[in-house]
Image (cartoon, helix red, strand yellow):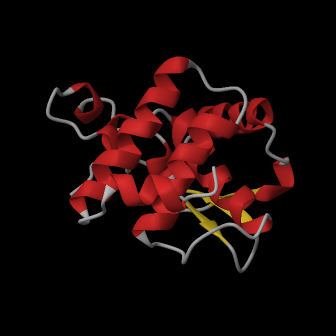
């Protein structure tokens, strides 16, 4: 099971998310804070931000942590934004599918401006790791995504 932050976001953390969103080019109207897991809702066309947008501070420093557990708030936000952009551009796959998750992380790493090299690397490694866990073939996935 993936361990990320589960403590409700403080006002300071919400302000950090808003600042990161602004730097990534996300319209502030697209961000909604709530208590559930962070997700892009294609029905609402909003990025719903929950506590797990932040890594768990202790787990993320553990060498056995997965790349998903190590994703920074900024990288996780870029991943959700990538779902929004690919959906709006009509190039998303079925929500929750291996293809859609792989594409969102690769798209975030390659196309979303405002991420540093570490975040870009972690997003690519997350894309590969999560796809493999679900039986995805990386070669095939790379050939079908629209990035
Ligand atoms: Zn996703």
Quarter occupied by residue 49: bottom right
Q: Residue at x 51, y 47 (%)?
A: 105
Residue furthest to the top: 117
Task: Report the number of numbered marks.
Answer: 0
* Placement of 37 over or under 113, stated as above or below: below
* Quadrant holding the N terminus: bottom left
The image shows residue 109 at horizontal and vertical percentages of 57, 36
Side of 105 relative to 110 (left or right): left
Q: Residue at x 44, y 50 (%)?
A: 52
Identify which residue, 82 or 3, lies in the foreground.
Answer: 82
The image shows residue 123 at horizontal and vertical percentages of 46, 38
The image shows residue 83 at horizontal and vertical percentages of 63, 59
Q: Residue at x 65, y 40 (%)?
A: 14
Quarter occupied by residue 58: top left
Side of 42 relative to 76 (left or right): right
Instruction: Residue 100: tell me if it is visible.
Output: yes
Side of 131 relative to 38 (left or right): left
The image shows residue 87 at horizontal and vertical percentages of 71, 67
* Placement of 115 over or under 143, stated as above or below: above
* Placement of 100 over or under 116, stated as above or below: below
Q: Residue at x 37, y 51 (%)?
A: 6
Instruction: Residue 4: tell me if it is visible.
Output: no
């Amino acid at each position: 099971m993936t361990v990320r932050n589960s403590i409700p976001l403080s006002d300071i953390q919400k302000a950090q998310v808003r600042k990161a969103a602004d730097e990534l080019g996300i319209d502030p109207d697209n961000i909604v804070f709530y208590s559930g897991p962070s997700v892009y809702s294609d029905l609402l066309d909003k990025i719903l931000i929950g506590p797990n947008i932040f890594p768990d501070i202790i787990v993320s420093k553990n060498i056995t942590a997965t790349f998903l557990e190590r994703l920074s708030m900024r990288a996780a936000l870029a991943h959700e934004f990538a779902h929004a952009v690919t959906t709006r551009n009509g190039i998303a796959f079925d929500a929750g599918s291996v293809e859609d998750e792989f594409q969102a992380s690769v798209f975030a790493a390659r196309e979303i401006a405002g991420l540093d090299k570490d975040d870009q690397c972690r997003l690519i490694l997350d894309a590969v790791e999560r796809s493999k866990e679900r039986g995805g073939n990386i070669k095939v996935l790379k050939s079908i995504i629209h990035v």
